[in-house]
Image (spheres, rainbow, N blue to C red):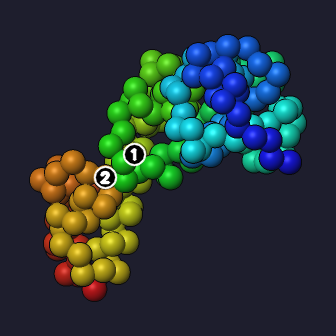
Amino acid sequence: MLHPLTNGRWQKIITNQSGNFFYGVKTTKIFCKPTCHSKTPNKDNVLIFKTTREAIKSGFRPCKRCQPTGQTLSNDEWVNQIKKYLQLNYQQKLTLDKIALDCHGSSSSLQRIFKKITNKSPNDYLIELRLQHSQQLLRETDYSIKTIAARCGFNSDTYFNTSFKTKYHQTPLDYKYHNN
């Protein structure tokens, strides 16, 4: 059931005031208490829930920071949430701080827990995702290397080339040539 995002509710969210509702952020699929001190969401991406059960039933997960269900998210669940976030946002400019903010945790905890569970840093995981997507674009499109680098979230085609060659022992252009 949808509940309206009234001006009063929005004010409580942006000023971290207590309220008898929860809010979910569509882009992260995380729900919070209005008192949560995580990054203020884009108003267009906010859904209102009366209960935690309603939020969970709608496919949202509880925030690791404000713990709206009163239970902490297990580290495995949080890492899975972070992985999903990275899979959905790999094309964006992402820093550890931004990932931590959007996934409702501290950057030091995110780095430590993610690496402990996956044996990779969040950045290494992100680069792997970007490289996997670049392989698909190299095989299936006629995009330039520069365009592919940008579409996969790399800041420069030079960094993309270096990362690709380090991982696959060939340049993106060689890969494209041998896989078309």
| Mark number, residue 126 | 1
| Mark number, residue 153 | 2
In the displayed structure, 36 sits above or below 138; it is: above
Q: Residue at x 51, y 26 (%)?
A: 39
Task: Name the residue furthest bottom.
Answer: 180
What's the residue type where badge 2 is placed? Answer: Gly
Which quadrant would residue 134 be assigned to in this image?
Answer: bottom left
Q: Residue at x 45, y 33 (%)?
A: 99
What's the residue type where badge 1 is placed? Answer: Leu
Residue placed most toward the observer, 59 or 140: 59
Residues under numbered marks 1 and 2 in contact, where contact means CB atoms less than 8 Å apart: yes
| Mark number, residue 38 | none
The reply, left or right, for residue 108 in relation to residue 82 is left
Residue placed most toward the observer, 125 or 90: 90
Task: Name the residue furthest front.
Answer: 7
Q: Residue 126, position in %: x, y?
A: 40, 45
Q: Mark 1, residues whose alpha carbon is within 10 Å: few (<14), some, or many (≥20)?
A: many
Q: Earlier in the sequence, mark 1 or mark 2?
A: 1
Q: Nearer the viewer, mark 1 or mark 2?
A: 2
Where disc 2 sits, the SS reads: loop
Q: Residue at x 21, y 54 (%)?
A: 160
The reply, left or right, for residue 153 in relation to residue 68 is left
Where disc 1 sits, the SS reads: helix
